[in-house]
Image: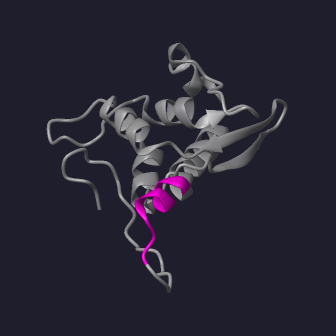
């Protein structure tokens, strides 16, 4: 399932409802803007952190990707762009500069696929979205 406007894959399953009163806007914003990250160890290099992107950054990322005539993502560097934006250092700074997007595909395929899978998962993308990027 994708967002019709941006073709961004969206989660297919809804989370289990929480009992109790509805939260306030401030509570929602506070809870969802907290940095969420997962460690990822790269053999021979060390530990990096895969970060959840704010929705505004995720939208910019997916809007930057090349598309086919039907509007579907058809970008040879889609996985590199995702890795570039989501992989961070201990302080939360982006490790890869945008100018290094062309170099990311030269990394080991196993590392690229594993990183992309974690990047998509932490950003709430569906398995179908992960599979579509892996196929490219």
Q: Is residue 65 above or below residue 113?
A: above
Residue drawn at x 62%, y 50% as measured from the top left: 36
Q: Is residue 87 visible?
A: yes
Residue drawn at x 55%, y 44% as measured from the top left: 116
Query: Viewer-proximal residue, 131 or 24?
Result: 24
**Was residue 72 drawn as part of the magenta stretch in this picture?**
no
Residue drawn at x 81%, y 30% as measured from the top left: 45
**Was residue 25 drawn as part of the magenta stretch in this picture?**
yes
Q: Looking at the image, which residue sits at the far bottom?
A: 19
Percent position of residue 107, x then y: 64, 28
Choose top left, top right, bottom left or bottom right for residue 62: top left
Q: Is residue 41 above or below residue 16?
A: above
- Left or right: residue 13 versus residue 98 is left
Figure coloring? one colour
Query: Viewer-proximal residue, 37 or 119?
Result: 37
How many marks the image carries: the answer is 0
Q: Looking at the image, which residue sits at the far top?
A: 99
- Left or right: residue 20 versus residue 11 is right
| Image quadrant where one finds the C terminus | top left
Percent position of residue 22, x then y: 42, 76
Query: Viewer-proximal residue, 114 or 21?
Result: 21
- Left or right: residue 59 versus residue 34 is left
Q: Please, what is the dominant secondary structure of the magenta stretch? A: helix
Q: Is residue 121 visible?
A: no
Give the magenta-colored segment's residue range: 22-30
Q: Is residue 106 above or below residue 63?
A: above
Choose top left, top right, bottom left or bottom right for residue 14: bottom left
Choose top left, top right, bottom left or bottom right for residue 71: top left
Percent position of residue 65, x then y: 33, 31
Percent position of residue 101, x then y: 51, 21
| Image quadrant where one finds the N terminus | bottom left
Residue drawn at x 51%, y 13% as measured from the top left: 99
């Amino acid at each position: 399932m994708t967002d019709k406007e941006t073709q961004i894959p969206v989660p297919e399953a809804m989370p289990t409802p929480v009992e109790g009163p509805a939260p306030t806007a401030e509570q929602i914003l506070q809870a969802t803007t907290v940095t969420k990250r997962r460690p990822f160890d790269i053999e021979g290099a060390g530990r990096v952190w895969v970060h959840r992107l704010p929705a505004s950054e995720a939208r910019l990322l997916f809007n930057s990707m090349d598309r086919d005539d039907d509007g579907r993502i058809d970008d040879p560097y889609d996985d590199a762009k995702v890795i570039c934006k989501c992989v961070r250092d201990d302080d939360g700074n982006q490790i890869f500069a945008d100018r290094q997007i062309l170099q990311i595909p030269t990394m080991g395929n196993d590392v690229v696929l594993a990183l992309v899978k974690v990047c998509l998962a932490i950003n709430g993308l569906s398995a179908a979205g992960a599979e579509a990027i892996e196929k490219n």
